[in-house]
Image: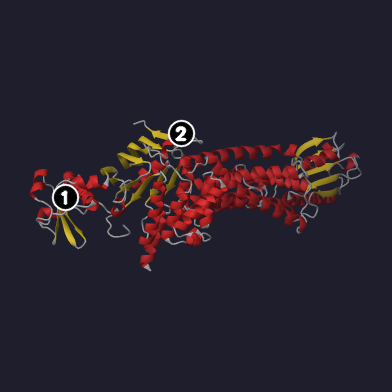
Amino acid sequence: MWAMIVKEFRQLRRDRRTLAMMIVMPVILLVVLGYAASFDVKTVTVAVSGPQASVVAGLLRSPSFDITQIAPGQGRTWAQDRLRDGNDQMAVVTGGTKPLVLIDGSQLFAARAALTYLAALEHRFSGAPGAAGGGTGSGLPVTPKVVILYNPGLTTSDIMIPGLCGVVLVFVGTIITSLGVVRERQSGTLEQLAVMPLRPRDVFLGKIVPYFAVATVDLAIVLAVGVAIFGVPFRGSPAAFALGALMFLFVTLGIGVLISSVSQNQGQAIQLAFMTLLPQVLLSGLIFPLSSIAAGVRWIAYLLPLTYFNEISRGIMLRAEPIASLWQPFVFLAVLGAVVVTGATLRFRAYLAPAGRERGRKAAPVTQGAAA
Amino acid sequence: MTGAESGQVTWGATELFVSHGRTVALRGVSLSAPAGQVTAVVGGDGAGKTTLLRCMAGSLAPGSGTVRRPPKERSGYFPASSGIYEDLTVAENLDFRANGYGLPRQVGRDRAAEYLERAGLSAASGRLAGQLSGGMRQKLAVIAAMLHHPDLLVLDEPTTGVDPVSRSGLWWLIARAAAEGCAVVLATTYLDEAERCTAVLVLDEGTELVSGSPEQIVAAMPGVLRAVPFKPEGEAAARAWRRAGRWRRWDPLSGQDTDQAPVGRGGVITPDLQDAVTVAALARQVGQDSDPGPAVLAGQHQGGAA
């Protein structure tokens, strides 16, 4: 047994990445989960509209509610648009017989928190009638009408499945792609590809198009199952969703190729791919609400493509958010995609064309070298 | 490309220097590969064969020196890793190559069928390449490399680890390519194989040890070679090696001395290519230092399908 132990430690020492992962991963997980793993939404953002907007805003003002907009001249449509576009988690429309409270159900934990805080507020008013503005004659009732939009039942599957679409795309895009490309290197066939009359672009695209197709089919299946079996709504524009998915897939495939270009074998590729998958699952807002993640860790979320895809897929599927108000995640995805795909193409080219100077399909013989 | 048919084109390399990090793999090596001929690159492990062949195939850019080779679509390469997809069938592998080199579908199929037939692989065409025996896989890889009738065919040890029957099948394919006007450059550790090539380049630690036709290399051997029954003693032990149950002893004599020791007297024998190459390596070693060491050429091999 001793011989085995010694051999194993020697091999482990050579395999620095595994060793690093064994030591670093638990620490990272501990830190990230410690700061990020929270379902508690401490502050709910609120927009208030209608004639008594200022008064109501004054009543609501507390550590639990962050009043972002007070718009006495606006009505319900405006308030609802604020929620649809993801600007606020709650909106209050005044001016009717009862104030109308709109809550964005697509932000599950924020919605639950909003309900809790509202209940506490009502309790306070009923416990001390007239204490706050009761005698002003504005007729403010203590029980507002509450409407939960987009996910009235506050079901988990409604918010999980749009996000899961993203996870499926990450899985296929990053893990499967990196394996497929690194396999060429491991089996030595990459050298053969390098000397064949194929342009690096042909090899790159030829390599990722099949995965692209498979990922698209996967996405369709997840969506179909989500809608048919779990009853997840699809309220927005399928075209906008498809565009978002396409851009997101582009980023994840690029990451897959990048990973494969820095990995010597499939084991390393899997390790790296998981190291990109894990933070995306934990920090993208898929499980834990973004606003609950400690600021020290939250910036990581904004580097992850899944964060933006989550915003897009939830916005479009649940809230029918128009593409115009989603321009931010789209732009970030485009930037990430450009960076990642450029990097991947360059790495791929360097690794496919060591001969460098020869490109295209020249018919003339090649004389290469010099510079002695 | 135009001259390939008429056998006038000579591909090759001049004064190549290649280093991998701090290791110098090639130091000023030149190679000439005329169309229609098979040129062997011989050397032990780490001699620089693969590096030279990768330069010829275009998968490695030399640090300095020039490589003269046809454009990619007119070259064929069999890398040391064989370049075959183990999870594709024999037919699918060839189909990929034919497509990649832009062969018309029917031409690719006809050629594949013909080569597979001649190499005895027809029955295996539906089998996964990973399930083939070593010899069959090597044959498949050579067929794949020559399917598009390249002007230059670069083969990195196609016969290493292959049984004698498969080796003769491989040699049929190689001879066929050369007969069609292709310049073949082949790395091998087997000197009996090099003996059947038109020209041989022997590498040792990244430099040229000897080169020329096998006859030229034998004729250029300095000194005298003897076959003796026992290992010589003393200083001569460093210049002796075992071969075929007897000992070879080499004495670096002047040309005049050679005349005094004709073949047949005192155990003096006519060297073959293997002897000549071993002597060249010994001569270099003796010239460099007097430290006795093992014969330099690692890949000495006897028998096989010569």
Left or right of residue A210: residue A359: left
Q: For the residue carrying disc 2, how many other residues have a C-alpha within 10 Å: few (<14), some (14-19), or many (20+)?
A: few
Question: In x, y percent, where is residue A204?
Answer: 55, 43
Q: In which quadrant is the N terminus of chain A drawn? A: bottom left
Question: In x, y percent, where is residue A240?
Answer: 73, 42
Q: Mark 1 points at which residue?
A: B291
Q: Circle 2 — which element? A: loop
**Which amino acid does the dot numbered 1 rest on?**
Asp
Viewer-closest of B139 and A202: B139
Give the letter of the chain under mark 1.
B
Q: In this view, does A240 lie above or below B84?
A: above
Query: What is the quadrant of residue A68 in the picture?
Result: top right
- Does residue B34 appear in this view? yes
Left or right of residue A15: residue A93: right
Query: What is the quadrant of residue A136 in the picture?
Result: top right
Q: Circle 1 — which element? A: loop
What colouring style does the render use?
Answer: secondary structure
Q: Which of marks 2 and 1 is in front?
A: 2
Cα–Cα span, label 2 and label 1? 50 Å
Viewer-closest of B121 and A311: B121
Q: Mark 2 points at which residue?
A: A364
Give the letter of the chain under mark 2.
A
Question: In x, y percent, where is residue B37?
Answer: 35, 45
Q: In which quadrant is the C terminus of chain A drawn? A: top left
Left or right of residue B107: residue A68: right
